[in-house]
């Protein structure tokens, strides 16, 4: 079976583009920033399609059922044996499909922007923000627990704010970016009460650990049905897409 650790390159390549263009774009890549960002994202998109092919047609299915793969697990903070905050990348049919969708659509936006934003004074800055947005969305769909979802949810909000306020000289752009931050919903209460079932939430893990004392019950929470997971992610992504669609193009 394939080792899917290389999937970390899918979100990390746009992140590298963000830092490269954000730190050195206006000085060294003023005219070539668009080509560089688009080329980097093209690699990420091709990698996403390759991962999807490997998962759907080569070794993702076991006994007729697509398996869930923990491609990466890093223990960030450990409070007690078995109770920790982990950073995970979990692959399943939904997350695989979403990295293909996000990377491909973002690539189309990058290509379109080569002509649409040509001649802008802050051309490299725009592509830097766009790369951050792509990284945030890819991180969101690959998140393995509620903490990661919250982090990337807010990163999507920040990058959306930066893109909407790109033309900060225009009062309309400033008003739109402020309205985005004021009206954007925070993580809904349901995401804490009923977290995504791929992995237990931090709160759920603590609760399970305390309940385990003297009972011998397992610390792992019972997973929800696949239908619940699908509905959860569809609701999250549709709501976020609606709020993030107000980008610099609308101004």
Image: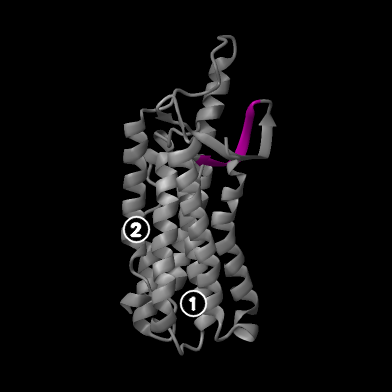
What residue lies at 55% left-to-right and 9% top-to-bottom?
215
Q: Is 79 located above or below residue 172 in the figure?
A: above
The residue lying toward the viewer, choosing from 163 and 54, is: 54
With 179 as the anchor, is 57 left or right in this view? right
Q: Is 98 located above or below residue 157 in the figure?
A: above
Q: How many numbered tags mark residues here? A: 2
Q: Which residue extends farthest front? A: 58
Q: CA distance from mark 2 to mark 1?
A: 19 Å
Residue 241 badge:
2
Disc 2 is placed on an element classified as: helix
Q: Which residue is mark 1?
A: 126
Residue 23: tell me if it is visible: yes
Q: Is 142 located above or below residue 17 in the figure?
A: above
User: Which stretch did the figure color magenta?
Assistant: 82-90
What residue lies at 68% left-to-right and 28% top-to-bottom?
80
Quarter the N terminus occupies: top right
Disc 1 is placed on an element classified as: helix
The residue lying toward the viewer, choosing from 133 and 219, is: 133
């Amino acid at each position: 079976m394939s080792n899917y650790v290389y999937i970390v390159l899918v979100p990390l390549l746009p992140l590298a583009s963000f830092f490269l263009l954000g730190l050195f774009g206006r000085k060294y890549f003023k005219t070539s920033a668009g080509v560089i960002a688009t080329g980097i994202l093209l690699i990420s998109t091709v990698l996403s399609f390759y991962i999807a092919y490997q998962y759907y047609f080569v070794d993702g299915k076991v006994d007729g059922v697509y398996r869930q793969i923990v491609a990466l697990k890093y223990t960030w903070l450990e409070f007690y044996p078995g109770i920790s905050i982990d950073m995970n990348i979990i692959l399943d049919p939904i997350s695989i499909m979403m990295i293909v969708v996000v990377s491909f659509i973002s690539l189309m936006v990058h290509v379109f922007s080569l002509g649409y934003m040509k001649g802008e004074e802050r051309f490299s800055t725009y592509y830097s923000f766009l790369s951050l947005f792509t990284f945030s969305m890819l991180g969101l769909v690959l998140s393995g627990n509620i903490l990661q979802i919250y982090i990337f949810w807010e990163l999507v909000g920040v990058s959306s704010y930066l893109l909407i306020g790109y033309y900060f000289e225009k009062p309309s752009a400033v008003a739109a970016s402020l309205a985005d931050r004021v009206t954007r919903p925070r993580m809904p209460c349901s995401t804490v009460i009923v977290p995504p079932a791929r992995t237990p939430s931090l709160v759920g893990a603590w609760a399970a650990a305390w309940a385990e004392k003297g009972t011998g019950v397992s610390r792992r929470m019972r997973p929800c049905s696949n239908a619940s997971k699908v509905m959860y992610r569809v609701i999250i992504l549709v709501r976020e897409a609606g709020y993030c669609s107000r980008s610099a193009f609308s101004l």
